[in-house]
Image: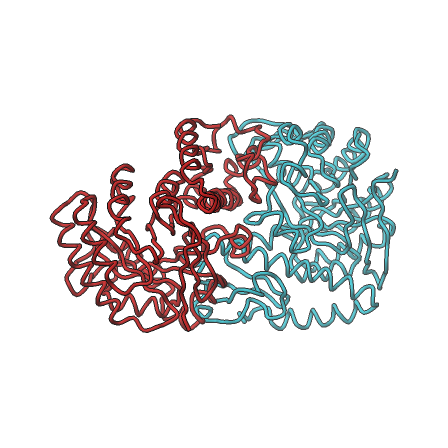
Chain colours: A cyan, B red
Amino acid sequence: MKHFTFNLIAQDGRGRAGTFQTPHGCISTPVFAPVGTQATVKALTPAQLEELGVTLLLANTYHLYLRPGADLISDMGGLHNFMNWNGPILTDSGGFQVFSLEDRREVSDRGVIFKSHLDGSEHEFTPENTIRMQEMLGADIIMVLDECATPYEREYNEQALERTHQWAERALAVKAREDQALIGIIQGGIFPDLRKRSAEFISSLDFPGVAIGGLSVGETKEEMYDILDVVEPILPKEKPRYLMGVGSPDDIVEAVWRGVDIFDCVLPTRMARNNAALTRTGRLNLRNAPYRSDRRPIDQQCSCYTCKNFSRAYVRHLIVAQEMLAASLLSIHNLQTLISLCNDLREAIIAGRLDKFVEEFRAHYQKHRPSET
Amino acid sequence: MKHFTFNLIAQDGRGRAGTFQTPHGCISTPVFAPVGTQATVKALTPAQLEELGVTLLLANTYHLYLRPGADLISDMGGLHNFMNWNGPILTDSGGFQVFSLEDRREVSDRGVIFKSHLDGSEHEFTPENTIRMQEMLGADIIMVLDECATPYEREYNEQALERTHQWAERALAVKAREDQALIGIIQGGIFPDLRKRSAEFISSLDFPGVAIGGLSVGETKEEMYDILDVVEPILPKEKPRYLMGVGSPDDIVEAVWRGVDIFDCVLPTRMARNNAALTRTGRLNLRNAPYRSDRRPIDQQCSCYTCKNFSRAYVRHLIVAQEMLAASLLSIHNLQTLISLCNDLREAIIAGRLDKFVEEFRAHYQKHRPSET
């Protein structure tokens, strides 16, 4: 039995509409995956995520390994059961978090030794043990450990790339569960030749999907789009492509237009907790005084629970009164914005009008970006 | 057209099962009303409240008057529309909050001048203007301004009672909206003769319901129950009776057994934010270590969303990881405990087995109270 099948339903230019079958359900792509760092998408219940039409969730191995522990989650029947999410889940390898710890890590070919941000205790991640941890967590899609270099340092990127490639082979070699898809990660900073080399190498290995890592980490948007332009022609058409950690509306549109299928990002839920609403034309800071008596929903075009039932004035009141419901209502809306954007991109690809959709989006997003209405 | 009708469906001893028809729907009594202080029940959406079977919500005039302002809520179409709750709402008069301000208030026959807890600004509540504010808010059930004395001071209680009675008459005289039921409040501390006098006076006025205030504010449970025993025979049978601010499982059972119909309390939602689960046999502090790997739901008998879908281990993880979802899941469960308790009390009254229900509850609640499982 084949646990994973990726089918391309339609292509329009580089844009792709597909279906990715996993043991916990089918994901229609392009897809945006909300982030549930600690086995919960902050401020939302799984029922609310389901109502939003979420199909794929991301959880962080680094955080779950430290707390409550992969062993505990395994004892509780795995992540799906533990957090009561019966759809597809993706876990990262923890690499991104550990390499963000800066002064608290030591890397070698064997792996990376780091100090916990919670209590300073020492731990080690290796290509092998992060696979075992992710096998204990039991997500549908799991990731190789990679070394995440800062985007502009050429020498470091060259070294890190070699290691990332070795680690990818070692991860593949130890992976045991057949009901999990292991995805390889392309690195290489902002250097086209390194990215090209990495895309070729990772594509040559037996991964059922490829990810592009190390973007949206400090480089400009144009640099990111340029890298996508370099990498895309190399990627196998028959495998899903995942752009890690990217999720603003404009980046999603530009990346789908350049052939990306899967996205995840903390942006929509983090913005929600910072009182900002995300729309297709920009963002609103709902704490601002003009919203005090604004009867309109956050976005008149939006069909989410928040926009169907609450005014900007009410959401602003919740923010000013420091009520938790503000974060929930804004998270619902912000996720809906990205989910419906992906749905519309998919439809545009199927209908063969992706260029037109992207063109209109660009005009509108630019035009309204700085505005607050 | 009559906007409010209270019908007694069944009586069993002093216990009563009724229906209270209001402009926004029918309330089956006994009923527990969750508190939405600032026009939101903390950490829950109105959709979640509906799913819980909540029929009556309480909101606080003091808080809403100060922020965002009764005028704003009125402009936004009233409280039902503002907070998207289309069922019955009850607002208090703000008296309890203002008289809790201790050093920041000055009371006279005219009313009470106080300093806002938000910014120290000076405001005045009178029997007349609190009715006008509540008319702007637009709840179905509104309350008279009363003077809340500390329960043990006889002299203060005598004076406060006189004033509370005057204020009740003045509130009745200015009330204008026919689609709001104004409820009078009985005071008198722990003094049976004062309580008797107050019950007689308030019952003699043309209120469609009577409330018992000033209890659960520092006196013992036995003193509270004794006061209910004194007051109950005086209360009109044909009007609903509301015991303000009371809502622990044992107090609800004892008060229903003594003829009370309506309850409200912050206890279930406040406990939730303090990591405690409320059950019919006591409470669990879910932060405690033994719950780390406890696969059981909070309460195996409970049918709420939380208990149907999540383990104690998961809720504990959310608490330890300081995730907002902990407060939401615990609020859902704690409210369900009180709502289903009221439903069961109602059924017991209708079936004529209230004494038996109360007896069993007492035995069980006492027995398990100190336990943590």
Q: Is residue A3 visible?
A: yes
Query: Which quadrant is the C terminus of chain A positioned in?
Result: bottom right
Q: Residue at x 47, y 56 (%)?
A: B55
> Furthest-left residue in view?
B155
Q: Indicate left or right for A20 with A47 as reference.
A: right
Image spot of residue A96 (x, y percent): 65, 41
Corner quadrant of residue B130: bottom left
Number of marks in picture? 0
Quadrant of the image occupied by residue B364: top left
User: Residue B370: horizontal and vertical position, in percent?
Assistant: 40, 27
Q: Position of residue A344 (x, y in %)?
A: 73, 64
Q: Is residue B272 above or below residue A77?
A: below
- Left or right: residue B199 versus residue A74 is left
Going 66% across and 43% down the picture, which residue do you hit? A85
Looking at the picture, tell me which residue is in the foreground, B221 or B208: B208
In the image, taking residue B46 as reference, residue A158 lies left or right, namely right
The one nearer the camera, B18 or A362, is: B18
- In what quadrant of the picture does the N terminus of chain A appear? top right
State whether residue B365 is above or below residue B196.
above
Left or right of B202? Residue A250 is: right
Q: Position of residue B81 (x, y in %)?
A: 47, 67
Q: Residue at x 48, y 42 (%)?
A: B337
Query: Is residue A315 among the parts visible in the rendering?
Result: no
Residue nearer the viewer, A214 or B12: B12
